[in-house]
């Protein structure tokens, strides 16, 4: 049996475009001799539509698109993901389903059993879980069709206090009782650099455990924050990855599951190269799918804005990036020359607006109210906010979308000014720790010096008061980032981190800063997610709470 | 049997204070002769802790607090809500439980069956649902102990396209097979003005259907956005509400379920009075629980900031509200005199900062970049953002928390400036449509004119260009709000709203404005929730999506 694996980048709710592309790939598969074409989870509407699933017109449009796809399947079979309506009179109104369509007829609808509802996943909000199991018969073979999480029954819980298996049922254990010949899994599985390998080993484990070949089709492309990396694959019954498809781009492959072929895998990339590619895809899809073309950002001469500028150029082209240099009296001379050198290396348009007269006008206007009071963080924030107003003015006037340049270490400890440098339509580095921002810069300079070396080697500073350094108020980033990773990604308590050998005061202070800054993160732009725990809707903490450790 | 109903305001994660108050109320109940004391859902930690439930130290602290409470129950029984650990090796690691404690021993732990996962509720994210049922035996009676949603099995789904019952199991149907004598329901049920009556009728329906008396204990108080209104009650087996407890404040009541007593209910309030009280409680709890004391806001002379100022004074006292008047060259003279009159009526501190020189300094700095270009929304936004910087400076310098004054109609259509008038620590009116802002103003003036009449009667304007009126760019608020309510709260499609008799162009334009402004709402402060569908985490729409109707 020849199966086409179709790995596409869907636009949520854009039914015309999605349907047209799905049908053209069905036709391509047919032309190339495939018997069955497999698309990813919720391919018809795009994953994940969130509360659009509660709207009638969204479901009506989905059903209409499914009809068109069904009509396009003469002499070929298709497995494709779509929400379907629960027609019983009890339970959530939708299922997250895989449709088995054969020769213009939906022959079977398989509902997802395990509904991920943790981190960025929210499926039980909208879907009723499946409770009965059946295989699909096609060309004399029995197909065990499953939807994404259905193969992840053995994953550990994400709590830090009692590791165990997350689910009480195993869909494949049930399906295996019906003696299937092949597992098909349609997925929408996002990228995270620190869970590299987990996905592949989970799929391999399933193939080996049931001694069955496995066809896995993932979606690719970014949906606001969440970046899907593709990497669809065919694994044989011995657990060997026979065909591995592209990462971070669309791909199409026909595999003959009955004929043994040469193994074809993807060249392995370093974690930092993957993060780079993920962020570029994230920016590109945000702009393309929103219909935006040009970006802006403030280039400070520091490393964060430098790395964002390079990523923006990779994603949008140098002709579409227009930056502002906004020095104040605290900006060092080299900050400006470094920023200019970077802009010229990248060939992007840059302009300089001195903020001093604006800052002076604020301070003058406020002087009757602040008479006799010392300068403090208020005056530092006025500088950051004056810059925020300027880049937003550029954005408003020319339609350039502001890219936010805050990194994850800063977001974590609240080192940034709300309505100032925390502004932006999209946060590019909000899930990248400062130490990895340095790694990205080095990676970007691997062939030639794009980012001036001085930007990489000078001590990080916000330049909001004379001779300010990040290290005045924060621990060194290599220590801080390690503490933050344990506290945020691994949910370790301060006591656990301290017993791992970190300085107690540093750990407690870092945790305290994370906790008291939930309110700031509440108002930050969407953050491109590259880790297993990004700030944003995958990490929901109460604002009004007392935090302990 | 004498049962004490204890309706408290919990602070999430503040175990010392919560435990101390729980124990003091157990003692009070004992002193007053109660046999059983009933607290609300997740009372030990406060509802809802979100992802703090994934942290070990949070669960450890909960278990420690439960131990202390257990020790305090000599010669009395207690029903109280707490998360408990799932000790099997499969499934989510926690249950949302009701503990039945009797004479220093946990005699039974009852887990919640129906886990609300819709709107603001997210319980399946953290909890495994119960699957087995048992009653609690106490003083010769069988108690059917349930947790909140367990009585809501018959509620309709919240989708707009296929109304039906949300759940496939009925906990009380199961418990009724064991012949209980009394239903106890511990709850955390939030206020929403447009579902007034639904809660009471659901409880009454359960009492009548099973012909059983019902003790219902709700929590009270605001947890950031979500406002719990209390209103705990005792309903007899005939469905009569015999005792109804206070709304929007703590309360304590002992009922003898075996002796018929005089009916005691709460005086009914108008919807607008309830909204007023809910918002005041929302502000008060945000400040108290965060440890803040003083508030600031920009007083424009318009109705939104006027109503917020009045609510702030009700919540915090006039001595703790410090406002800024920030006129520009487009501000009308009466805006300033109206604002001054309001501030003086309220007895709050006010200061005036003219923004014109600041706006000029921005425009001067940007003039080389904008040369030859027409003035547009960019320049309007600069004014709003200059004001945003000024109130934030006041906030930074004096520790006053900025209250946001945007109303729901504006939030819906994106009529507001990000990083300008959309700034704030808490949005007071973000769930109140403009028409209800007027109703609130009238309500506030019911005894004497607190808000100058001119503020209420003049046409709404942002005053960002000469003679600007909201009605230049928006439909009249009474029509707009009706359309928005159907689109947002009721999930109606544009076609449905048009067929209800609204102008097609108005409806499509309003829906379009709602959809293209998801990105702005993504970055707004937490919004006090008073409706059944507030903007914020109870309404999750994808940013990058194509919207249709």
Image (cartoon, coloured by chain):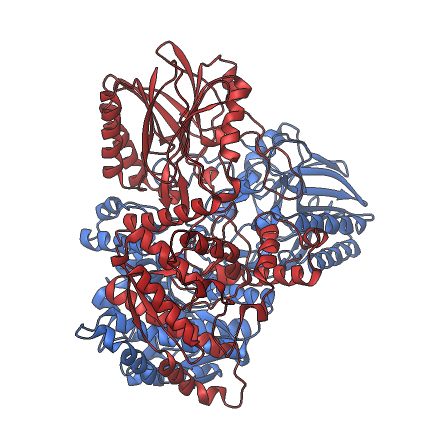
Chain colours: A red, B blue
| Residue in front for this viewpoint, B179 or A386 | A386
Q: Is residue B414 visible?
A: no
Q: Residue at x 50, y 79 (%)?
A: A466
| Horizontal side, residue B40 vs residue A197: left or right | right
| Residue in front for this viewpoint, A194 or B344 | A194
Q: Is residue A4 visible?
A: yes
| Quarter of the image where one finds residue B469 | bottom left
Q: Residue at x 43, y 64 (%)?
A: A422
| Horizontal side, residue B241 vs residue B485: left or right | right
Q: How many marks?
A: 0
Q: Residue at x 52, y 56 (%)?
A: A435
| Quarter of the image where one finds residue A331 | bottom left
- x, y (%) of residue A283? 35, 51
What is the residue that sits farthest to the front in this orientation?
Answer: A448
| Horizontal side, residue B174 vs residue A394: left or right | right
Question: Is B474 situated above or below B182?
Answer: below
- x, y (%) of residue A512? 62, 62
- x, y (%) of residue A223? 37, 45
State the quadrant of the C terminus of chain A. Answer: bottom right
- x, y (%) of residue A126? 43, 38
State the quadrant of the N terminus of chain A. Answer: top left
């Amino acid at each position: 049996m020849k199966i086409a694996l179709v790995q596409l980048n869907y636009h949520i709710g854009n039914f015309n475009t999605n349907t047209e592309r799905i049908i053209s790939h069905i036709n391509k598969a047919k032309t190339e001799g495939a018997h069955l074409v497999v698309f990813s989870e919720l391919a018809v509407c795009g994953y994940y539509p969130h509360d659009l699933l509660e709207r009638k017109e969204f479901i009506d449009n989905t059903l209409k698109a499914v009809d068109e796809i069904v009509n396009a399947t003469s002499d070929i079979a298709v497995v494709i993901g779509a929400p379907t309506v629960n027609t019983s009179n009890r339970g959530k109104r939708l299922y997250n389903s895989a449709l088995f369509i054969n020769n213009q007829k939906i022959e079977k609808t398989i509902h997802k059993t395990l509904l991920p509802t943790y981190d960025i996943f929210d499926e039980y909000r909208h879907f009723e879980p499946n409770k009965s199991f059946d295989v699909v018969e096609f060309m004399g073979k029995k197909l065990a069709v499953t939807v994404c999480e259905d193969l992840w029954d053995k994953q550990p819980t994400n709590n830090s206090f009692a590791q165990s298996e997350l689910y009480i049922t195993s869909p494949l254990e049930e399906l295996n009782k019906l003696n299937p010949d092949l597992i098909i899994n349609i997925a929408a599985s996002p990228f995270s650099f620190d869970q590299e390998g987990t996905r592949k080993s989970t799929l391999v484990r399933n193939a080996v455990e049931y001694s069955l070949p496995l066809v896995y089709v993932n979606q690719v492309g970014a949906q606001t924050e969440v970046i899907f990396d593709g990497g669809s694959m065919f694994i044989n019954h011995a657990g060997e990855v026979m065909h591995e498809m592209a990462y971070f781009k669309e791909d199409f492959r026909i595999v003959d599951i009955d004929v043994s072929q040469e193994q074809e895998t993807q060249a392995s990339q370093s974690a930092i190269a993957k993060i780079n590619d993920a962020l570029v895809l994230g920016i590109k899809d945000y702009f393309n799918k929103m219909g935006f073309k040009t970006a802006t950002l403030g280039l400070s001469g520091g490393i964060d804005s430098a790395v964002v500028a390079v990523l923006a150029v990779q994603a949008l082209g140098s002709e579409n990036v227009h930056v502002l240099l906004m020095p104040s009296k605290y900006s060092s001379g080299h900050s400006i020359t470094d920023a200019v050198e970077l802009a010229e290396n990248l060939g992007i348009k840059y302009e300089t607006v001195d903020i001093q007269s604006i800052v002076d006008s604020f301070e003058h206007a406020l002087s009757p109210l602040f008479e006799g009071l010392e300068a403090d963080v208020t005056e530092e924030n006025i500088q950051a906010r004056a810059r925020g107003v300027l880049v937003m003015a550029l954005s408003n006037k020319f339609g350039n979308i502001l890219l936010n340049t805050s990194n994850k270490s800063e977001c974590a400890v609240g080192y940034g000014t709300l309505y100032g440098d925390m502004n932006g339509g999209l946060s590019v580095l909000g899930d990248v720790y400062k130490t990895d921002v340095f790694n990205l810069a080095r990676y970007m300079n691997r062939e030639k010096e794009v980012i001036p070396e001085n930007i990489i080697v000078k001590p990080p500073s916000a330049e909001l008061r004379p001779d300010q350094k990040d290290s005045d108020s924060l621990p060194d980033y290599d220590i801080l980032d390690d503490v933050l990773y344990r506290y945020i990604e691994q949910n370790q308590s301060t006591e656990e981190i301290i017993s791992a050998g970190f300085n107690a005061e540093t750990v407690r202070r870092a945790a305290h800063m994370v906790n008291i800054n939930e309110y700031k993160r509440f108002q930050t732009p969407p953050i491109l997610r590259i880790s297993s725990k990004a700030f944003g809707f995958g990490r929901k903490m109460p604002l009004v709470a007392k935090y302990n450790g």
